[in-house]
Amino acid sequence: MVEIEPFRIAVAPADLDDLHIRLDRTRWPDELPGVGDEFGVPLARVRELADYWRHRYDWRAAEAELNSHPQFITDIDGQRIHFLHVRCERPDALALVLTHGWPGSIVEFLNVIGPLSAEFHLVIPSIPGWGFSGPTRQRGWDVNRVARAWAELMSRLGYQRYGVHGGDWGSSVSRALSEHDAERVVGVHLNYLPTPPLPGDPDRADLSPGDQERYDQTAAYLRNQPGVRTINGTRPQTPAYGITDSPVGLLAWLLDPMTMWAARDFPISPDRVLTNVMLFWLTRTGGTAPRLHRETGRPPSWLTVAPVGIFVPPEDITRPIRRYAERRMPIARWTEADRGGHFAALEVPDLLVEDIRAFFGTP
């Protein structure tokens, strides 16, 4: 029998002492006057968060919150897999796999576990390379291999039918999972869906003004990929030395895309930001999570027969064009949200929960 073992986070005091020493000894870089965020995440913003991290952030409270949810580890395809498994009180509830993205982690879903677990059995895995799933041990851990691992995980947990949800990499994994486990995946809910034009799509000139804006937004993003995204997809080992050794380096590396991609008012608390950073810091996976970018060399498959629900935050890095999406997959629900950015579960958990419930037909 394949073992699934209970897991509990218990960080040694010495690890926290080491973190504090490193924060105290930070060597701060120079910054050009008046450049704002044109050259990267501003010095003042990182200093402020680093000071909060050192003097006011409470890891033990965050650790207790994480440990309040049942956690487990198992080995799949030669890789350790860490996951939360939060069961609904109703035994016949639908299971739902929630897959995070980058620069996030399972912390993305802490604000939605309570309301969603009232109606779903939740399975929330850490992607190989992230957090307590630890570094990947072999080459080849791309989106499709992660999806196959999730299908095996759901088999081990005994679920014969389940839904999937994700944003960022979670969107790609969820779409791939619907292909690899089509007989059991009953629905795919996404809060991120890039739709660059494919052969046969309507030309830009044939789109509505609103969709032309989305077309241009996607084209601009593809032409000017953020520096961190480009490095992750090409040379992830190089920044790994700095962000594994320096907590402030790791903070800045993760905060930069998080700030660029979240809504302008950044409705994510400092504690959530830092708990997310801590999962990378404590497990030394800041440099291993980006291997997924390097390993996944092609866009995920569009093959899915499961109904698809799309939740579109107005301030996401790209927003999908519905006419394009409907040519690629069976869209059953389309929601244009009135607020939120790339990290929907952190930024607008109330809206996301409502949409997931509506899509899967729960009260």
Image (cartoon, grey):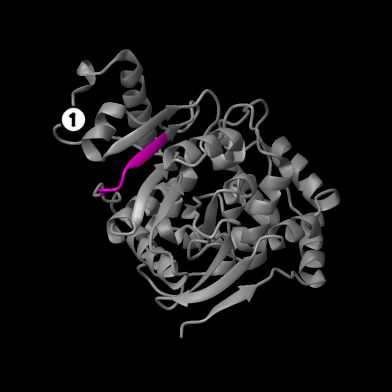
- Residue 335, picture quadrant: top left
The spot of residue 5 in percent (x, y) is 58, 78
Q: Which residue lies furthest to the bottom in this view?
A: 1
Q: Can residue 140 be seen in this view?
A: yes
Q: Depth check: 136 or 148 in front?
A: 148
Q: Which of 272 and 159 is in front in this view?
A: 159
Q: Which residue is drawn at 34% across and 41% down?
A: 308
For the residue pair 232 and 92, the one nearer the viewer reads as: 92
Residue 136 versus residue 303 in the image, above or below: below
**Number of numbered discs present?**
1
Q: Is residue 311 magenta?
A: no
Mark 1 belongs to which amino acid?
A: Asp
As drawn, which residue projects farthest toward the right?
A: 55
What residue is at 70 percent from the left and 42 percent from the top?
46
Q: In this view, does 141 lie above or below 138?
A: above
Residue under numbered circle 1: 201
Q: In this view, does 20 lie above or below 79?
A: above
Q: Where is residue 256 in the image (x, y as percent from the top left)?
A: 58, 41
Q: Over which residues does the magenta segment extend? A: 304-310
Q: Can residue 223 be seen at all in this image of the molecule?
A: no
Camera-nearest residue between 47 and 149: 149
In the displayed structure image, the side of residue 113 where residue 143 appears, left or right: left
In this picture, residue 114 sits left or right of residue 80: right
The percent position of residue 94, horizontal first and vertical second, equals 47, 54
Give neighbour class at mark 1: few <14, some 14-19, many 20+ (Cα, 10 Å). Answer: some
| 249 sits left or right of 260 in the view | right
> Which residue lies at the image location 35% right of the left edge and 68% below the top edge?
140
The kind of secondary structure element at disc 1 is loop
Q: Is residue 308 covered in magenta? A: yes
